[in-house]
Amino acid sequence: MEINELIDLNSLRTAPNLSDSQVKKLLKELEVNIFKTDWITIGIMAPCDSKAIEALRSISKKYPSIKFGNLDSLHADGSVFLKGNQKTGNVFVRSENGLGEGILLTCQYDEDSKESNTFGPLPLDFFT
């Protein structure tokens, strides 16, 4: 399957390998949405907690306004699902088998009339 737009990722269970040009194109499209949103939630499916935390930190490094606390206290065994909420700064991680791998980013709005949109799965190294 050819990945040309963010919508092309919607049917995937795990993040595809992307070329540098695909990453640049998708990042440009994603940033239009990120910069219009009031806040985001991030879901990360990873083979271990350290890879999930590393992916979350890469997002905070790229976008300094997206901060999360207490990352050093997170731990779960085996494959994990991590969820971070920009609005509250809270992050949770749990062990979960049978997931794919990748980052799911949901743009949220304070107004109920605006519908949230989820993008991904993006590769764990997408924001590095």
Image (cartoon, rainbow, N blue to C red):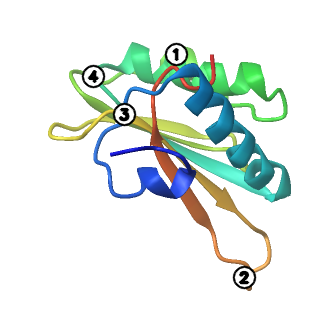
Q: Which residue is mark 3?
A: 16
Q: Which mark is residue 112?
A: 2
Mark found first going from the N terminus, 1 or 4: 4
Spatial CA distance of label 1 from label 3 is 18 Å
Please say if 61 is above or below 96. above
Spatial CA distance of label 1 from label 4 is 12 Å
Left-right relation of 16 to 104 = left
- Residue count near mark 3 (Cα–Cα under 10 Å), binned few <14, some 14–19, many ≥20: some
Mark found first going from the N terminus, 3 or 2: 3
SS assignment at label 3: loop
Left-right relation of 76 to 93 = left
Q: Which residue is mark 4?
A: 47
- Disc 4 residue type? Pro
What residue is rendered at 51% in x and 58% in y? 7
Where is residue 39 shown, x and y percent of the image? 75, 53
Rendered image quadrant of residue 20: top right
- Disc 3 residue type? Pro
Mark found first going from the N terminus, 1 or 2: 1
Q: Which mark is residue 54?
A: 1
Dot in front, 3 or 2: 3
Mark found first going from the N terminus, 1 or 3: 3
Please say if 122 is above or below 35. above
Mark found first going from the N terminus, 3 or 4: 3
Rendered image quadrant of residue 90: top right
